[in-house]
Image (spheres, rainbow, N blue to C red):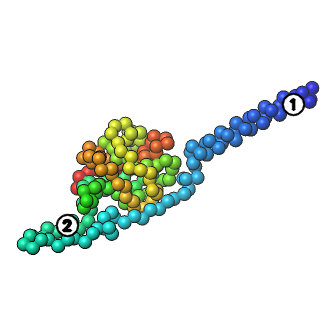
């Protein structure tokens, strides 16, 4: 009886162990818990400052209108915390060439899997009421979050009408939750 029992238990134990190892591997991939202890700091310059071409001289007899000194700030807001403690400033900028950029300044949030910067039309709500609203209406992903700390720039696609959007969210696409968000108020 001992041999029969041992022959039956061994495959069962091996099967349970294989399922447990596969489950642990999937859980580690899906949740990526190590990111909670890994900070990525990004320090990008304000767009347009270094790459601005020198101004051309006006034709003779024409009055010179000075070019803007830098990017024009159209709207801004302070980030509030949602799923994770989040702080910093968000600015919507228009560059000299007419393109738009969302700039995050002094960002400080948790790292996480599949974080993105969303430009949205959703209202910014405090507390749990604001955690899941940013992908419900119109929204544009400006790309993966470059780092969970620092200052960084995100180009807005040229075909996007920025006047249709009123907020920015640091969005975890894997779990459909906002880490933090800011209402964009015209400046």
Please say if 37 is above or below 16.
below
- According to the image, label 2 marks what residue? 67
Q: Which is in the foreground here, disc 1 or disc 2?
A: 2
Q: Tag 1, which secondary structure? A: helix
Percent across and percent down for residue 149 are: 45, 59
- According to the image, label 1 marks what residue? 7
Ranked by sequence position, the earlier of labels 1 and 2 is: 1
Percent across and percent down for residue 42 are: 44, 62
Res. 185 in view: yes
Percent across and percent down for residue 138 are: 33, 39
How many residues crowd around disc 2 within 10 Å: few (fewer than 14), some, or many (20 or more)? few
Q: Is residue 172 left or right of residue 165?
A: right
Q: Residue at x 39, y 46 (%)?
A: 141
Q: Is residue 121 left or right of residue 174?
A: left
Foreground of the two, 178 or 10: 10
Q: Residue at x 44, y 53 (%)?
A: 145
Q: Residue at x 39, y 61 (%)?
A: 151
């Amino acid at each position: 009886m001992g041999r029969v029992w041992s022959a039956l238990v061994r495959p069962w134990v091996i099967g349970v162990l294989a399922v447990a190892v596969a489950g642990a591997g999937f859980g580690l991939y899906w949740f990526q818990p190590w990111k909670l202890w890994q900070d990525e700091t990004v320090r990008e310059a304000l767009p347009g400052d270094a790459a601005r071409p020198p101004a051309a001289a006006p034709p003779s007899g024409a009055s010179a209108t000075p070019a803007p000194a830098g990017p024009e700030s159209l709207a801004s807001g302070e980030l509030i915390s949602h799923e994770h403690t989040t702080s910093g400033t968000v600015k919507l900028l228009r560059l000299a060439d007419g393109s738009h950029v969302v700039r995050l300044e002094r960002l400080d949030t948790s790292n996480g899997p599949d974080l993105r910067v969303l430009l949205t039309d959703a209202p910014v709500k405090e507390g749990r009421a604001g955690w899941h609203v940013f992908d419900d209406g119109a929204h544009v992903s400006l790309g993966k979050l470059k780092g969970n700390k620092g200052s960084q720039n995100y180009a807005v696609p040229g075909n996007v009408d920025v006047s249709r959007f009123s907020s920015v969210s640091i969005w975890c696409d894997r779990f459909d939750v906002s880490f933090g968000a800011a209402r964009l108020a015209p400046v």
